[in-house]
Image: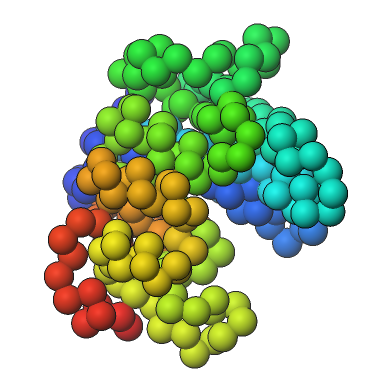
Amino acid sequence: MQTADPAGVAYTRILLKLSGEALLGHQEYGIDPMVVNSIAREIVTVRNWGVSVAVVVGGGNIFRGAAAASRGMDRATADYMGMLATVMNGLALQDAIEILGVQTRVMTGIEMDKVAEPFIRRRAERHLEKDRVVILVAGTGNPYFTTDTAAALRAIELHADVVLKATKVDGVFEYDPLENPSARRFSTLDYMEALSRELQVMDGTALSLLKDNGLPIVVFNLAPGNIERVVRGEQIGTLIAANVQAVLAGVE
């Protein structure tokens, strides 16, 4: 049963992009149940505020197609293997959410009827209308496309208000903050600035798709409580949108 959030929410329908690495916790490989349970609790919280939630999950904690391709594996084969890894993560997230009493549907870009529904846009919209959390796996179902591109595509198809990209860092930086701790963070960015600077917010295909459709992105650190904070409209991470004024003045 949904309950109103007394503080109000900034978005009524979100597409949450989770990398596979987000599920690692402090492990080097696989899925940390404590991390998955924490993410699930926040998803359930914002869903109970009346927010429609769709999630696109990556698979890099289990298998990275691009890395395997760089070592000589056929790229299409490697990408399909990576898609299968996202299905495993999606099922883990589904289990954690449903333990909390919220219905979910896992929808996949590659048909596998025994474990998930095929992605059909109108069916996915109907699930969201029925307050189910929709977990989208196997990317677009096609090799050579990243899960970032899948997130952009599904967000547009499902009429999301925003793409929330959860990462290991506090937003978008001028340089990699893990390699250069003095790198400055942008609080706001224009799409073109992000593309021209090659800031690695998302791959260029995903970012261009979001730009062409005017869909904003918030890049933020997946620390406990931050999904809820972003949905409430708190200014954390980096907001990327059209016509953001004085981009450089927004660098912290």
- Quarter of the image with the N terminus in it: top left
Residue at image coords 33%, 27%: 158
In the picture provided, is 124 more to the left or to the right than 143? left
Q: Is residue 173 visible?
A: yes
Q: For residue 54, what is the image quadrant?
A: top left
From this view, report whether residue 64 is shown above or below residue 248. Answer: above
In the picture provided, is 184 more to the left or to the right than 214? right
- Quarter of the image with the C terminus in it: bottom left
In the picture provided, is 91 more to the left or to the right than 16? right
Residue 121 placed where, x, y %? 39, 18
Judge by depth and name the residue closer to the eye, 7 or 173. Answer: 173
Q: For residue 248, what is the image quadrant?
A: bottom left
From this view, report whether residue 3 is shown above or below residue 227. Answer: above
Judge by depth and name the residue closer to the eye, 93 or 102. Answer: 93
Residue 126 placed where, x, y %? 35, 14
Judge by depth and name the residue closer to the eye, 167 or 249. Answer: 249
